[in-house]
Amino acid sequence: MPLFPSEERGRVDALAALTYGNPFDPAFVEREREILGDDYEPHGTVWSYRVGPGDAAVMSKLGAVAERLVDDARVRLLGRTRVSETELGLYADLVVHTLFERYADELYHLHVDPTPARRRVRCYDRFQCDVAHFLRIESRSFPDGLDAPHLFACFFQIRRAFGLIFRHIIGASRPAAELRASVWQSIFTHDMRRYRRSLYRHMRDVTTLVVGLSGTGKELVARAIGLSRYVPFDPQRETFAGDLDGAFHPLNLSALSPTLIESELFGHRKGAFTGRLRTGSAGSRRVRRWARCCSTRSASSTPPSRSSCSACCNPVSSSGSEKQPSVGSKAS
């Protein structure tokens, strides 16, 4: 007998895809409809900010479905000796979805008011017990990256990223929806499983160039990316190991000369300026380890040299008729 009965397997597969999907992709809404069936309440073809209970109601129903499926699967898992790797992977995906929905509200409050996150996070004890309840099963081996501190840090990052994108990059049009989806992918890449396993360690080395006309929201996009960085969780102190403040540093390049821009972004060597007696430190190293810097430039300012820019930017083509900024990422 399989771990998931045939009548449940379709929902389980859809929930697993939903767990690691891009919430701002139209396919995400289609999977919600598939999972909830007749209980689905339409809330648009894409996730966009509106005043009303529709979005919260959908997530509450999805959480209830996941809770029931994972509880039933755990009982069957305890009573079986042989389970395929595919079934164990689906079970782990259900656990991840269930735990995220269970703690989503508390993580959101930590995002809105980060002061408690600097002290002991009280809900972590319960979270750690829930992880052990679902995933510490004798003779069962689950995928990497599901230890409680890392999973808690990932959940907090996802909750912050969703709030920053959902509530600040608004609009129900397809271009706005595509922009939100691009920002999400810039933070988590197109493969969130791989991000959870390993890429989260390296994303601070990935640079992002946001281009668009004046007034289209480039700084909103940059702020969402900068404030959505991964912050490790310290299980000994039960608090986050990084400073949640000062993660975003806007820099108006139009107020600086080209040579000063290069100096601030890339540093300078002794003798670069008249009377300079020592080597200056690179501006990028002055930003704290977990921080990101956003640079903006007006049409009238002169950019630094192409050789300098290529070290920090991944150029993305942008036509003058664009009404939404474009987002591009590239590992340095």
Image (cartoon, rainbow, N blue to C red):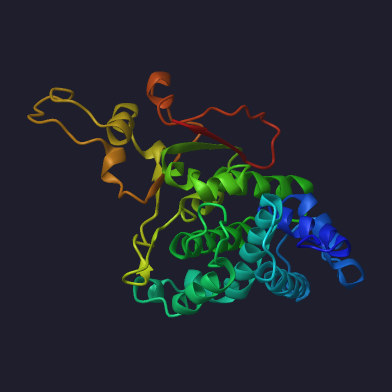
Residue 51 vertical placement versus 4 (above, below):
below
Q: Residue at x 7, y 29 (%)?
A: 277
* Residue that extends furthest to the front in the rendered view of this protein: 81
Nearer to the camera, 121 or 148 = 148
* Residue that extends furthest to the right in the rendered view of this protein: 38
Q: Which residue is drawn at 37% across and 50% down?
A: 291
- The picture places residue 318, in percent across and down from the top left corner, at 63, 30
Quadrant that contains the N terminus: bottom right
On screen, residue 7 versus residue 263, left or right, reads right
Q: Which residue is drawn at 79% across and 62% down?
A: 4
On screen, residue 66 versus residue 44, left or right, reads left
Can you see residue 270? yes
Can you see residue 109? no
Nearer to the camera, 286 or 230 = 230
- The picture places residue 230, in percent across and down from the top left corner, at 45, 54
Residue 182 vertical placement versus 125 (above, below):
above
- The picture places residue 34, in percent across and down from the top left corner, at 86, 60
Q: Which residue is drawn at 50% across and 61% down?
A: 151
- The picture places residue 44, in percent across and down from the top left corner, at 83, 61
Residue 13: quadrant of the picture: bottom right
Quadrant that contains the C terminus: top left
**Total label count?**
0
